[in-house]
Amino acid sequence: QKEVEQDPGPLSVPEGAIVSLNCTYSNSAFQYFMWYRQYSRKGPELLMYTYSSGNKEDGRFTAQVDKSSKYISLFIRDSQPSDSATYLCAIPYYGNNRLAFGKGNQVVVIP
Amino acid sequence: NAGVTQTPKFQVLKTGQSMTLQCAQDMNHEYMSWYRQDPGMGLRLIHYSVGAGITDQGEVPNGYNVSRSTTEDFPLRLLSAAPSQTSVYFCASSYRQGFGNTIYFGEGSWLTVV
């Protein structure tokens, strides 16, 4: 079983819509959760991280962790064409020496 | 500040050839790592290093060698390239491993093995 699972389906939304992305993870001991954004033909960049449970907001982005379900989510409000990218969830493991990535969701925001 | 620099950006190899992907960072980061990214597979860790002289295997180390003789450089060597190694390779670094340390990625190296 992989540390983190993310359904890699593409997602197209109209500008201004709310984007909802999800991942599940395997180990209830995981405490630290990240979301990376990757533009086409570029390296991933850290978008947000959360520690333990609850929500974290940063502008139009909200990261949410539900430890009871082992479920993490990323919401993008008022989506913009500039949000078009692949979003990957990631979790550090193995003594925090390794980073396990989900497969990523390609998001396209249509003007 | 250049960040994480990878070279070459594009490379075509023949099966059985060897090559080295270069990675350098100028942020005095202790932790460096190499990932490969394949369609439908996400990013998978190949090797990592927690400091000069220290390396360890990641999730998919077979067919790759690394060394860390300096803090700045972390080259990835393909000893005998195979078509299965066709991928996009990303080098990454952070101040140290662990929580709260932002990992910075390079721009990627596109490798095709024919």
Image (cartoon, coloured by chain):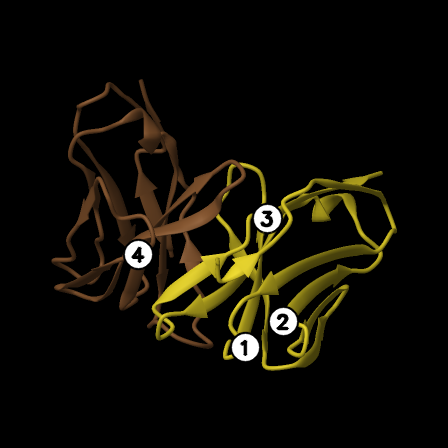
Chain colours: A yellow, B brown
Where residue B58 is drawn, which disc sits there?
4
Looking at the rendered image, the disc whose residue lies closer to the viewer, 4 or 1, is 1
Q: Residue at x 26, y 48 (%)?
A: B61
Q: Which residue is mark 3?
A: A104
The image position of residue B68, as x and y in percent, is 16, 57
Q: Residue furthest front?
A: A1
Q: Could you tell me how far apart the alpha carbons at marks 2 and 4 are, in whole angstroms? A: 24 Å
Amino acid residing under circle 3? Gly
Same subunit: marks 2 and 1: yes
Secondary structure under tag 1 reads: loop
Above or below — where is B1 with respect to A48?
Answer: above
Secondary structure under tag 3 reads: loop
Same subunit: marks 1 and 3: yes
Where residue A70 is drawn, which disc sits there?
2
Taking A103 as reference, is B85 left or right?
left
Cβ atoms at labels 2 and 1 below 8 Å apart: yes
Cβ atoms at labels 1 and 3 below 8 Å apart: no
Amino acid residing under circle 1? Ser
Looking at the rendered image, the disc whose residue lies closer to the viewer, 2 or 4, is 2
The image position of residue A51, as x and y in percent, is 57, 80
Q: Earlier in the sequence, mark 2 or mark 3?
A: 2
Instruction: Identify the chain of the residue marked 1, using the numbered disc in the image.
Output: A
